[in-house]
Amino acid sequence: MRKRSKYSYCSESLRKDSGLERYEWNMNTKVNIAGIEWKNPVTTASGTFGSGLEYSEFVDLNQIGAVTTKGVSSIPWTGNSTPRIAETYGGMLNAVGLQNPGVDVFVKRDIPFLKQYDTRIIVNICGKTTKDYCDVVEGLADCDVDMLEINISCPNVKEGGIAFGQNCCQVEAITKEVKKYAGQPVIMKLSPNVTDITEIAKAAEAGGADAISLINTLTGMKIDIHKRKFVLANKTGGLSGPAIKPIAVRMVNQVAGAVKLPIIGMGGIMTGEDALEFIMAGATAVAVGTANFIKPTATMEVIQEIENYMKKYKIEDIRELIGCVDRV
Amino acid sequence: MRKRSKYSYCSESLRKDSGLERYEWNMNTKVNIAGIEWKNPVTTASGTFGSGLEYSEFVDLNQIGAVTTKGVSSIPWTGNSTPRIAETYGGMLNAVGLQNPGVDVFVKRDIPFLKQYDTRIIVNICGKTTKDYCDVVEGLADCDVDMLEINISCPNVKEGGIAFGQNCCQVEAITKEVKKYAGQPVIMKLSPNVTDITEIAKAAEAGGADAISLINTLTGMKIDIHKRKFVLANKTGGLSGPAIKPIAVRMVNQVAGAVKLPIIGMGGIMTGEDALEFIMAGATAVAVGTANFIKPTATMEVIQEIENYMKKYKIEDIRELIGCVDRV
Amino acid sequence: MVKIHKKTAVITSQVQLTEDIYSMWIRDGETAAGAKPGQFLSLYCKSESRLLPRPVSICEIDKEKGTLRLVYRVVGGGTEEFSHYNTGDTIEVLGPLGNGFHAEGSRAILIGGGIGIPPMLELAKQLDCGKRIVLGYRDITFLDKEFEKYGKVSISTEDGSSGTKGNVIDAIKANLLEGDIIYACGPIPMLRGVKAFAMEHGIKAQLSMEERMACGIGACLACVCKSGKKDPHTNVNNKRICKDGPVFYAEEVEI
Amino acid sequence: MVKIHKKTAVITSQVQLTEDIYSMWIRDGETAAGAKPGQFLSLYCKSESRLLPRPVSICEIDKEKGTLRLVYRVVGGGTEEFSHYNTGDTIEVLGPLGNGFHAEGSRAILIGGGIGIPPMLELAKQLDCGKRIVLGYRDITFLDKEFEKYGKVSISTEDGSSGTKGNVIDAIKANLLEGDIIYACGPIPMLRGVKAFAMEHGIKAQLSMEERMACGIGACLACVCKSGKKDPHTNVNNKRICKDGPVFYAEEVEI
Ligand SMILES: Cc1cc2nc3c(=O)[nH]c(=O)nc-3n(C[C@H](O)[C@H](O)[C@H](O)COP(=O)(O)OP(=O)(O)OC[C@H]3O[C@@H](n4cnc5c(N)ncnc54)[C@H](O)[C@@H]3O)c2cc1C
Ligand SMILES: Cc1cc2nc3c(=O)[nH]c(=O)nc-3n(C[C@H](O)[C@H](O)[C@H](O)COP(=O)(O)OP(=O)(O)OC[C@H]3O[C@@H](n4cnc5c(N)ncnc54)[C@H](O)[C@@H]3O)c2cc1C
Ligand SMILES: Cc1cc2nc3c(=O)[nH]c(=O)nc-3n(C[C@H](O)[C@H](O)[C@H](O)COP(=O)(O)O)c2cc1C
Ligand SMILES: Cc1cc2nc3c(=O)[nH]c(=O)nc-3n(C[C@H](O)[C@H](O)[C@H](O)COP(=O)(O)O)c2cc1C
Ligand code: FES
Ligand code: FES
């Protein structure tokens, strides 16, 4: 058998640098999200990159626009029982259940680690109640982090998570509350498991969100037909990976047409081409998630391929590409 | 390069007959849906099999449990502009827009064709208004077809479709109306583009549905980054294929726990293993859709692989497997 | 009752013609036996992320050897994958599909534009009448030498690097070509020009059309084109390119 | 700053040991150079439908040739895919990952159960002390002959077809084995039995654990096992098998 064909991941033309750098192509990849400037539009999707420590063996964190950390809660969370993941066709299910060391350890250990690098720090926050969220947000208000991402959409937490993210009134209410305590711009991270994503996005905007990120995972299930039982201990899990990309791009495009806030798009990004689809759909920045598990250097490759595209088509400023496809 | 590896489609053990037929394994694959007996639990997903004519070159229609036809409306529909399809990672988007010759031609031409075969006939029905649906249902009341499947979930029709399928009150109301005119059992086909599929299923049950089928396609989008335009003329399309299977299995399992009606499960079924996942999740029958495009004989292979599984595990009656995994 | 199946064909040669155009011969006796010029094959990718078949026209048929030639341009992942196959590798194919060209008239003009050129080669070979061949390119030419055995070839290029500068119609006019039947395959703007030319001169024209496909056999209604009259099968003004085409009379289709 | 990468290793041999167990040698000098017994590799599938890496233990290391041996059971699509690879084919790997066994004590008992047997082979080779080897099978044995060069081998089979009928603990008891350190890899029920045996006899035990993985490097928290004490990294009673393990002291983990 021959080498795995990578062509579906990224076309040859963008993987290979088009070579224009010879005559010093001057381009701008900087983007500004809610007043925070990133050196390029690529971050990591929360939960797929830890706090950057492990992946720093593979990736030069100085080169990525921002690092978004694993969700952190006010107290340590143990997460779900194992098995926590299952593979699906072109994707995966996870039911990690937001295991995290709690905000105190996070602030003492993970922020100082990330501060060594010249990259933006986005802290993803989870909670079971509005108070939980506010406690973490308040605890981080004086910390040296750049943005907060509020995960109101994790399908693995029964008490809060999903309920928050699927109801407009609750989204608006929690956004308002969180904003009261926040020392940094607040990104609301939306769940795709809803009838109308634009309503939810508008609620976040109404609540005072500074930016929106989407999509979190779609709720899915896998059954082991030989054992006749669920593969995941939690029965259901969140579907991520290239399988979900068309849904994510659609939602980003819809939300871009519905609110004025900047959008961080994600869901199945494996290559620079995928990232550009989100950007053209209306995202100001993108996050790379599941792809990290498949190619530990995925973030850097995505950045490189975006730059190659810009060179190839002589795009001077990445911002020319944001939302450049017609709105639906 | 070697032959395409098929292993992810179906494991070797089920593709190869386990050979137990030597000592004449007596098994029952018949299922009963709303009083209609099918010889096996496999049908075709509406819109992927025409009215059976073209695929009858590949498949012996006598061998499949039921043929579900392309959606038919009261008058001929022209459908959307092209391109109508786009490929995605492990799936595809379609925005055919329910092109169909109208119920009159359908009754005169397609039903007589299908009546030549010993298989159940399920007519899928689409409309823009409740009256449209009722007109078709009434027109078919005296026809020799076995079941009606009401597509209240096609995302490609702006006027009706999606709106009907995403709102509980409307689902209950249209089910009630359709039932007034129906001469055959009515299957309500649900959209997955909703916050809570169980609410919609309960509304269909309350309206008097005899069965439920799910899932229809998830709304998605693809952008051609080189042309910087939408790939589909319709901009959005419905995502189908193996990519969506985990979402479909989850929804079938949730609905199985929420209503008493029999369920026809679909969404990404490529193999007997996939079909069994739906059956174990709670589906009484399954439909094969996108897989027909990839393997024209997909329906027959799925039936064979289900039988191979039953032989391997000495299952005498397929009904033992329906919903045999714990409910969520 | 089953007539055609998905077959596993063996690649007997693969040659690169230009930077992005490849010529591949594949062997499957049954498929070759039934093939006609203008028909196409559905080619399946090995990559499991790419599910849909790629329709590719039959460029040449060798019934004796049971082989078929496909000439294709690398435009995306699927064709790129094909271009990496070597002699001896296998490929799954379904076909021959569609109707193909229908021989008629006594003085034919064969017109191919860009990647619409390959299907004209087998047609040129099989047509037993007077024929003039017109091939339109952007710049780099391919297959043109091979056509020369079957008739006089006129070339057009957009940049004027070979033959007439302009499009195929410009080449027809420049070479004062005449005929009583036109066979054409190429991009829509070219076909539109050919249709206008044919109508203007009262010549019959058979046009081979292209659209994105899913089933390739007429079931899914993905690949339609607009027809002037109501189509008997669809009962609307749409014809299925895969099943009712890809070859249509110019007056049948709105382009 | 970058220390390990995904590498493309070449398969230098592939042999079928039993109906469903295969032995594959792969070559990548850098990977082999850093490898220790008890560590594992993440193997990536070529099929684009299967995205996640498959963790497989290192069974033998040949630092001179720069090769590694992997012995694996076909249980699903990924391992089935691997079993079709031939000599000369390539495979993408990441590793060596995890911590591996830590040599200590003077009289070791090495215990492998089922597909937990392979990692014990390189350990048996490298351990420079008194050692007894216990291998537990359901029925058909594999690799047992290869262990004989490194120490006395006792076998248990569930059906009694070879060695002691029963499990590895039955074999230990039947053969009155003694030691001051146990190294074990196998299914959870076996590890649970080994842990109980070790505690009962006051022997130290290093256990190699298994769980479904996504990242394989400690970032995603997919592969945790329960720990008795709060883990310093996770700050909860969970340890990451891929990063903190796969080898743990018996008292560290709750099984
Ligand atoms: C009847 C017919 C005959 C054809 N004959 C030839 C030929 O002889 N030589 C040749 O080079 N090309 C031919 N084409 C075009 C060829 O099908 C596409 O170039 C090819 O499918 C592109 O696949 P890809 O994976 O490389 O591109 P991608 O863009 O990655 O493909 C994505 C999807 O879009 C479809 N698609 C993309 N472009 C086209 C297109 N132009 N037409 C139809 N589907 C498309 C693909 O099949 C696939 O489903 C023909 C098309 C048709 C309909
Ligand atoms: C540290 C470690 C070392 C291992 N060493 C070996 C070894 O030396 N030899 C060997 O045969 N097997 C070993 N395994 C088990 C091996 O990883 C699985 O058998 C293999 O991943 C199954 O892949 P599949 O595609 O064939 O099965 P599938 O069931 O199709 O795999 C689906 C998914 O589940 C995961 N999965 C399935 N079973 C297991 C399992 N038992 N453990 C972890 N993940 C699993 C797969 O990696 C994949 O992500 C080891 C596992 C771990 C964690
Ligand atoms: C293993 C895993 C853990 C995740 N944990 C979190 C989390 O803690 N907080 C969060 O907001 N999203 C979490 N996500 C969702 C991702 O951030 C992202 O929204 C989703 O996976 C889609 O992107 P992808 O397809 O690129 O992975 C997690 C995803 C995975 C796969
Ligand atoms: C090309 C195409 C056309 C479809 N047309 C219809 C339709 O007319 N009516 C309907 O209810 N569903 C239609 N569907 C949805 C399918 O019946 C099915 O619900 C969906 O594709 C999921 O199954 P799959 O992944 O196996 O294809 C269509 C799907 C495809 C791909
Ligand atoms: S591709 Fe399905 S009808 Fe033509
Ligand atoms: S597999 Fe990701 S932490 Fe172990």
Image (spheres, coloured by chain):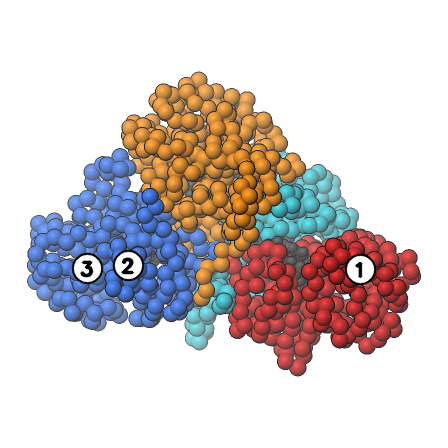
Chain colours: A cyan, B orange, C blue, D red
Q: Nearer the viewer, mark 1 or mark 3?
A: 1
Pointer 3 chain: C
Tell me the quadrant of the picture where the N terminus of chain B can be found.
Answer: bottom left
Residue at screen point 49% across, 44% down: B304
Q: Residue at label 2?
A: C32
Tell me the quadrant of the picture where the C terminus of chain B can be found.
Answer: top right
Task: Residue B125 in the image: state x and y as whole percent.
Answer: 40, 30
Say whether mark 1 is within 8 Å of ligand 2. Answer: no
Residue type at mark 3? Leu
Say whether mark 2 is within 8 Å of ligand 1. Answer: no
Q: Residue at label 1?
A: D164
Mark number, residue D236: none
Task: Residue B175 in the image: state x and y as whole percent.
Answer: 48, 23
Residues marked 1 and 3, same chain: no
Residue type at mark 2? Ala
Marks 1 and 2, how far apart at CA: 63 Å
Pointer 2 chain: C
Q: Nearer the viewer, mark 1 or mark 2?
A: 1
Residue type at mark 1? Thr
Determine whether, in the image, residue D22 is placed left or right of residue C90: right
Q: Nearer the viewer, mark 3 or mark 2?
A: 2
Determine whether, in the image, residue A129 is placed left or right of residue C23: right
**Nearer to us in this view, D25 or A164:** D25
Residue at screen point 80% across, 65% down: D154
